Amino acid sequence: MSNKRIIAAIIDFAIATVINAVCMFVFVLLPSANQSLEVDDNFVVRAMMVSMAGMLYLLLRDVLGSRSIGKIIMKLQIVDKSTGDKASFGQRFLRNITWVISWIEIIVFLANNGNRLGDMLAKTRVEEMNV
């Protein structure tokens, strides 16, 4: 199991946490500051929507730019397991959609020596870039 990969994941989870915290402050707490302490329907809806912001980053982190911020910093890339070429858009999406079942993903990662369920399904692996 690569330490660089774990550090990249920690960076990405920290980013997701910051996204959630900022969105919660801007879209939930600030608008509610001038209201009474009662929880209204809008508060609950806003809080539920904002709680998905960090998860959205985790789902799309490798899809749009081909590498997450954590992978960029740690100089890692996602490649097709059989060809060694950069993973396709579809492979990157499939490997990250498994974060919806995050606890299962973490258990599989720990039980399979650093192989994520998403990597197994998408037939990808994470490797160091040749710079």
Image (cartoon, grey):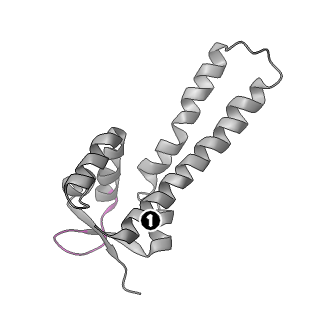
Give the residue drawn at x 72%, y 38%. Answer: 26
Residue 111 among magenta residues: no
Q: Is residue 46 visible?
A: yes
Q: Is residue 66 visible?
A: no
Number of other residues with Cα within 10 Å of mark 1, as a class: few under 14, some 14 to 19, many 20 or more: some
| Whole-percent x, y for residue 61 in the image | 46, 56
Farthest left residue in view: 82
Residue 86 among magenta residues: yes
Give the residue drawn at x 50%, y 72%. Answer: 73
Nearest the viewer among 116 and 88 is: 116
Q: Is residue 31 above or below residue 99?
A: above
| Whole-percent x, y for residue 50 in the image | 58, 34
Report which quarter residue 125 is drawn in: bottom left
| Whole-percent x, y for residue 84 in the image | 23, 75
Q: Main secondary structure of the magenta part?
A: loop
Report which quarter residue 113 is drawn in: bottom left
Q: Which residue is mark 1?
A: 7
Q: Is residue 75 above or below residue 130?
A: above
Report which quarter residue 104 is drawn in: top left
Amino acid on which the number 1 mark rests in the picture? Ile
> What residue range appears in magenta?
80-89
Q: Left or right: where does residue 54 sit relative to residue 76?
A: right
Q: Secondary structure at mark 1?
A: helix
The N terminus lies in quadrant: bottom left
Nearest the viewer among 90 and 5 is: 5
Q: Is residue 72 above or below residue 116?
A: below
Q: Is residue 24 above or below residue 3?
A: above
